[in-house]
């Protein structure tokens, strides 16, 4: 579930890049480019939403990308249900915002 939530958000970011004629095969480049599009006012998306996806040294180690890596590549079998629920709910909200961005000309 963690991987699916992350990839829903990530593929939404890829769709934004595609809308502007870009292509990316690197997660960090995708996230950075979307942040740039926000900063230059090409899209109306909150940087905090993108920060939820991004892995940085400044963030807690439990951001969406870190959780995706832990769920996908980790060996633990137990999951913090509250943490997972927060991730899924956050992903739904962000994907809805991305859909609005994609619907604008």
Image (tube, rainbow, N blue to C red):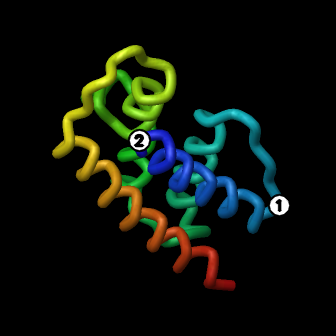
Does the CB distance between marks 1 and 2 fall below 8 Å? no
> Which residue is drawn at the image coordinates 20% and 42% (left, top)?
81
Location of the C terminus by quadrant is bottom right
Q: Residue furthest top?
A: 75
Residue 12 left/right relative to 92: right
Disc 2 marks which residue? 2
* Front residue (pair 78, 86): 78
> Which residue is drawn at the image coordinates 31% and 49% (left, top)?
87
Q: How many marks?
A: 2
Residue 102 is situated, as x and y percent measured from the top left of the image, at 63, 75
Residue 71 left/right relative to 78: right
Front position among marks 1 and 2: 2
> Which residue is drawn at the image coordinates 38% and 32% (left, top)?
67
Residue 63 is situated, as x and y percent measured from the top left of the image, at 33, 36
Using the image, determine if residue 10 lies above or below residue 26. Answer: below
Disc assigned to residue 37 = none
Disc 1 marks which residue? 21
Structural crowding at the residue carrying mark 1, measured as other residues with C-alpha within 10 Å and reported as few (<14), some (14–19) or many (≥20): few
Calculate the distance from the C-alpha at mark 1 to the C-alpha at mark 2.
29 Å
Q: Residue furthest front?
A: 77
Using the image, determine if residue 86 lies above or below residue 104. Answer: above
Quarter of the view holding residue 79: top left
Tag 1 secondary structure: loop
* Front residue (pair 17, 65): 65
Residue 17 is situated, as x and y percent measured from the top left of the image, at 71, 57
* Front residue (pair 33, 66): 66
Location of the N terminus by quadrant is top left
Tag 2 secondary structure: helix
Using the image, determine if residue 58 lies above or below residue 6. Answer: above
* Front residue (pair 64, 83): 83
Q: Which comes before the other along the chain, label 1 or label 2?
A: 2
């Amino acid at each position: 579930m963690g991987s699916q939530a992350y990839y829903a958000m990530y593929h939404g970011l890829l769709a934004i890049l595609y809308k502007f004629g870009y292509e990316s095969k690197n997660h960090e480049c995708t996230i950075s480019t979307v942040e740039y599009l926000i900063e230059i006012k090409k899209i109306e998306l909150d940087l905090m939403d993108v920060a939820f996806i991004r892995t940085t040294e400044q963030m807690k180690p439990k951001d969406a990308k870190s959780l995706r890596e832990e769920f996908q590549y980790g060996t633990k079998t137990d999951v913090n249900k509250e943490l997972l629920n927060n991730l899924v709910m956050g992903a739904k909200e962000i994907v809805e915002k991305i859909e609005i961005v994609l619907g604008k000309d």
